[in-house]
Amino acid sequence: MVLHRSWLESANAPEGEFPLNNLPYGVFSVGESDLRCGVAIGDRIVDATGLEAAGFLRADPDADVLDAPYWNDFMELGRAAWSRYRAALASMLAEGADEVVQDQIITHSVPMKDAALHMPFRVSEFTDFYSSRHHATNVGTMFRGAENALPPNWLHIPIGYNGRASSVVVSGTPVTRPHGQIMGPDDATPHFAPSARFDIELEMGAIVGQASDGPISVAEAFDNIFGYVLLNDWSARDIQAWEYQPLGPFQSKATATTISPWIVTAAALEPFRSSTPAREKPLLDYLTEPGPMLYDIALEVGLTPDGGSETVIAETNYNEMYYSAAQQLAHHSSSGCPMRVGDLLGSGTISGPKRENRGSLLELSWGGKEPITLDTGETRSFVEDGDTLTLRGHAQGSGYRVGFGACSGTVRPKR
Ligand code: MN
């Protein structure tokens, strides 16, 4: 877990998010330019589309795969091609690289501060899970009481629902407060109104990089995951409480899901693997992990009121999950469900054991009964109009970080 040094000095900063060890994949534009595939290194973005077109760095010798504003065609090439490309790019950026190569990179790169970032991949389908034990216990306690907090299936199945790929947006996209059907505890009849309990969910998103047709093992599922993003699954709790039985959330989670702009590859996260916790009930064979398949990724949420300063309202870690993305993907395929390149799997809200580890405002304010106080002195039970919510995450090496870039969204009122 040591820093791989680059000739690009900004990539060697200990607190930087994009050292040579990372090399995350995104899509960028500068001014009115076309959208292009890019790789973050230090304070620059390498124009992967340009390098391919110029013949300096090709993922596939026979076909252009980066001449599109998404990484899906690259993912389709498979794991061996992913490794070759990453190794070739890393050697071009490593300390000691040939000066001609350095010149090529400088020509085919832009300062990150000049670029706009876009969706890094085309989301084929979006599935969201519910796999953090602390989160499920907290929410279950609020909705059903402490005795029935965990549903009877929870320790056996990574519970999920099929979400909407169309609602997944990249960091920076404004989010409009949803209207919906609401039935409060004291209401005699439901009414249609703006959500008064609009919330965030701090999650990780796993991106499926290889298609499958039929059941796959947990080990195969692990190999099929291309990389990860931060994911904020915006949730209208008042709409959710009324609609969720018996088929699960629907309109309460269809407004928007925000992802961070860089795909951090499984390869970059490899040194940070960690294990799921001991099983309270043994899992069925098809869900058993052959080795550690989670990652140690420090996560936080910041809330910035309109015109105010940011307060960090939650800090947790991806290694709190009860089920890994590989287990979720194996379960998803177990019925024979075909999985496609570009499928996005949300981990479920990631909460830890302490109050400050809770990954949603629903839990932080305990259903609105215990509002949190911001550094500005204001209080919050749920998200207010004008609030900006920002997720951040990084894996910590010795003297370097593998970061994700911010996952941010500002809530605006319904027009
Ligand atoms: Mn969710």
Image (tube, rainbow, N blue to C red):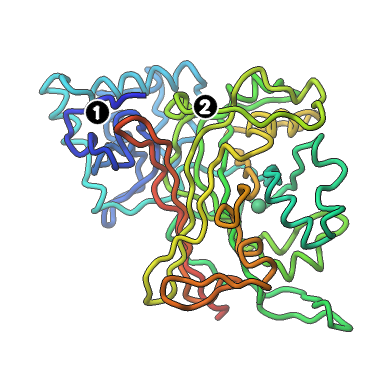
Q: Amino acid at mark 1?
A: Ala
User: Do tag 1 and tag 2 residues touch (Cβ < 8 Å)?
Assistant: no
Vertical arrangement, residue 184 with respect to residue 326, above or below: below
Badge 1: few (under 14), some or many (20 or more) residues near its Cα, within 10 Å? Answer: few
Where residue 119 is drawn, which disc sits there?
A: none
Where does the image place residue 140, in percent across and percent down from the top left?
78, 55
Residue behind mark 2? 273
x 36%, y 32%: residue? 22
Q: Secondary structure at mark 2?
A: strand
Task: Residue at 37% x, 51% y: name it.
Answer: 117
Task: Using the rendered view, name the quadrant where residue 89 is placed.
Answer: top left
Of callouts 1 and 2, which one flags the residue occurring earlier in the amino acid sequence?
1
Res. 167 visible in picture: no
Residue wearing tag 1: 54
Q: Residue at x 63, y 67 (%)?
A: 365
- Locate residue 309, reporting x and y percent: 37, 70
Q: In screen coordinates, is 305 left or right of 127?
A: left
Q: Residue furthest front?
A: 354
Question: Quarter of the image containing the N terminus?
Answer: top left
- Camera-near label (1 vs 2) is 2
Give the side of residue 312 with respect to residue 288, left or right.
Answer: left
Residue 122 screen position, x and y as percent: 53, 43
Q: Callout 2: few (<14), some (14-19), or many (20+) C-alpha neighbours within 10 Å? A: some
In this view, 397 is above or below 380: above
* Residue at x 42% of width, y 19% of height: 83
Question: What residue type is disc 2 on?
Answer: Arg
371 lies left or right of 66: right
The location of residue 139, given as percent across then percent down, is 74, 57
